[in-house]
Image: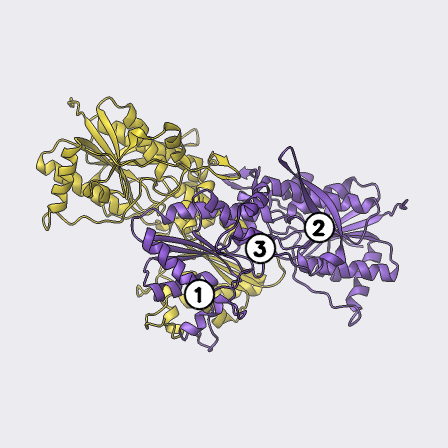
Chain colours: A purple, B yellow
Amino acid sequence: MIMENLKGACIIGQSGGPSSVINASALGAMQAAFKAYDITHVYGASHGIKGVLNDELYDLEVEDPSELELLRYTPSSALGSCRYKLKNWEDDDSEYFRILEIFKKYDIRYFFYNGGNDSMDTCNKISKFMLKEGYACRIMGIPKTIDNDLFGTDHCPGYGSAAKYIATSCMEIYHDAHVYDTGTVVVIEIMGRNAGWLTAASAIAASKGCGPDFIYLPEVPFNMDEFLAKVDEMYKKTGKCMIAVSEGLKDKDGKYISEYGSNLASQTDAFGHAQLGGTASTLANIIKMSLGIKKIRAIEFSLLQRCAAHCASDTDIRESYMAGAAAVEAAISGMTDKMVGFERSYENGKYKCNIKLLPLDIVANAEKKVPDSYITEDKTGLTKEFLDYAMPLIQGESALPMEDGVPRFAHLKKQLASK
Amino acid sequence: MIMENLKGACIIGQSGGPSSVINASALGAMQAAFKAYDITHVYGASHGIKGVLNDELYDLEVEDPSELELLRYTPSSALGSCRYKLKNWEDDDSEYFRILEIFKKYDIRYFFYNGGNDSMDTCNKISKFMLKEGYACRIMGIPKTIDNDLFGTDHCPGYGSAAKYIATSCMEIYHDAHVYDTGTVVVIEIMGRNAGWLTAASAIAASKGCGPDFIYLPEVPFNMDEFLAKVDEMYKKTGKCMIAVSEGLKDKDGKYISEYGSNLASQTDAFGHAQLGGTASTLANIIKMSLGIKKIRAIEFSLLQRCAAHCASDTDIRESYMAGAAAVEAAISGMTDKMVGFERSYENGKYKCNIKLLPLDIVANAEKKVPDSYITEDKTGLTKEFLDYAMPLIQGESALPMEDGVPRFAHLKKQLASK
């Protein structure tokens, strides 16, 4: 197939939850776009698709290249992000026509959208709408999610860095929690509403002898009695117990464990709203009450697991950059309506990450969970197969530049484009 | 004064809360002790003074030197720690005579105790008892506390690394919390019951434009109305507010802010015990209820701020090592009954850390708080004088060796000595 050249401007947008490396993907896309003969101007959308709808595009051509280079190591979304779901155009096409209007205004012929499941849904809808309207443009999704739950790709940019942070932090907490000869229980809560990939990363720490005794993923229905029995046994045997749990743990009836707290006591605020603790603090309270263990600590990695750029994986940074650049290169070569994905291969036993392209509509809204073969038979650990999968993704350390003893992150001008 | 040589074995003990660098001090002491002609054998106390009382000493001479070298980068207390307060010997001298018995059994003539306020109290009591009993030995305290609240020393080993972790993490959370164009409030809780040094470190992030808007230290009585007014004003102006608070915040009547939660609602567990949230989650709840702000997140740095060795300060590592080595060298040269302290000087504007020795009894149980001159007039920030004080302590990054993408911490044999 001989593709005609398509000349015009491009928009790069970031969407969904932050990660340590989404800006590395943005940088990859920007630098490829700057180089591309067919791309006449490079814009960044302020807060993802909201910036397109609001006619708030940053002129990325006025940015200092050396500041842009720092995006490789700067966490969160430098252009701003959003959680914004477009309606189906069958129900309401006004936003789609608004996007088309902006595309025409700036002569946008390339649209690169960087995000997770919901963002690929947005990307897919826009792509299909532009096809339907016969507006010539190329639309590519760039994957990003610490949750690692995008369908069709071996893994997702962002996961390796979050996994490295989680494994490292678990090892450090293990050392801390084992310092006294008195009993200690630690419950660590890790992100993941439906998929347990992040929590599974704590198994890397366990494989080094400094990790959780038990790991609970949302893929497995949670049984409180079995859980308490396991903690009790380990605590009686060793005086310690370290547990990693996904925030999204549910029992067999689909009830979140974090909701168990409201059964235990009348924990309501001044307005009568139930005050739900997190999953870890709920479990810590239940352990305290049921097993009479006094020294117990609930720890949430909270936002840091998705923004701790100082502990990013170099492999993840490089692959994220590559995903951004590949999206632009594929679009220039004529591809559209695709998401960049990863496929792994091994050359002489050495891990290699290759680019593949996936149709946007098979990716949008699909969700990849941790497969059974990665979960041990007793459902409280991860198999060697999982470790073989995860280990290559966390290799290498970030070359994040430091200034005055703290990270030197990018400072962009973010100058709005006018037309 | 000409000192007679004192030949005999030594014990190195670790006590109190973990830090990222207490093992660097232990390594400094061990390596100096191995080299010292007068020190006939090097023991480590298992779990601090408890190991002495229980006759559980590790034979450090059988350890692999390359594993010991990794102690420089390994967090928490590799020999085990304790929180154990000796009685005054006037009330009960049985434990002191037990310690003397163990000292005699192993021919201990050198005792090095590494810890914070309470540990210096232990060290001081043992020192004075041995003097009283006329048992020839030399007893030295090696400072350690992330809290930075030891009296008489410019700063404490452990503080620089914790401060670096806190500043770095605040900068990263700032990026995460500013990613959406929707309102967000973040309350970060940092350790420090009585002294605000750790919370103050968040001002380093603020000085880089990526830190908390307001910082609340336990040195300043907390006023809830003024706090809410400030948050409200900032949120209305910018749609964001980031706040750093010490866990030990108290109001003017001495009531902990974390206890405010129990007034707001009947938060009791199944046994009727009040469930106190942390300071950050209590404040987050109060902001939610009083100001009607929905998106608010309470984050606790929890254990990681004292054990995140991957983010340690190289300056802190080097100084901690130096403190351990200096304690041994001073003892060999005839000193006893002292704690090693730090004094800073500037040579051509360049920070330099010098060793000084302080009498144990002036250090024990004294507490150093953040001085008024370090706190801004409005009491919600830190002055340039504080930044000038703190910045040199966080310089340089740890050379922590990595293996398989995660830290390679020390694995000691911990073989019990028998005699």
Amino acid tagged 3: Asp
Q: Earlier in the sequence, mark 1 or mark 2?
A: 2
Amino acid tagged 2: Ile
Q: Nearer the viewer, residue B123 or A4?
A: A4
Q: In the figure, is residue A171 to the left or right of A31?
A: left
Q: Are marks 2 and 3 in contact (CB under 8 Å)?
A: no
Q: Which mark is residue B26?
A: none
Which residue is painted at 18% across and 48% down in the image?
A: B86
User: Where does label 2 land, which residue?
Assistant: A142
- Numbered disc 2: what chain? A
Q: Residue furthest front?
A: A377
- Numbered disc 3: what chain? A
Q: Nearer the viewer, residue A6 or A217?
A: A217
Q: Specify the quadrant of the image occupied by residue B315.
A: top left
How packed mark 3 is, by other alpha carbons closer than 10 Å (few <14, some 14-19, many 20 or more), is few
Amino acid tagged 1: Met
- Numbered disc 1: what chain? A
User: Where does label 3 land, which residue?
Assistant: A372
Which residue is painted at 63% across and 52% down in the image?
A: A77
Q: Quadrant of the C terminus of chain B?
A: top left
The Cα–Cα distance between marks 1 and 2, rounded to whole angstroms, is 39 Å
Which type of secondary structure does the marked residue at label 3 adopt? helix
How packed mark 2 is, by other alpha carbons closer than 10 Å (few <14, some 14-19, many 20 or more), is many
From this viewpoint, is residue A16 visible?
yes
Q: Are marks 1 and 2 on the same chain?
A: yes
Which type of secondary structure does the marked residue at label 1 adopt? helix
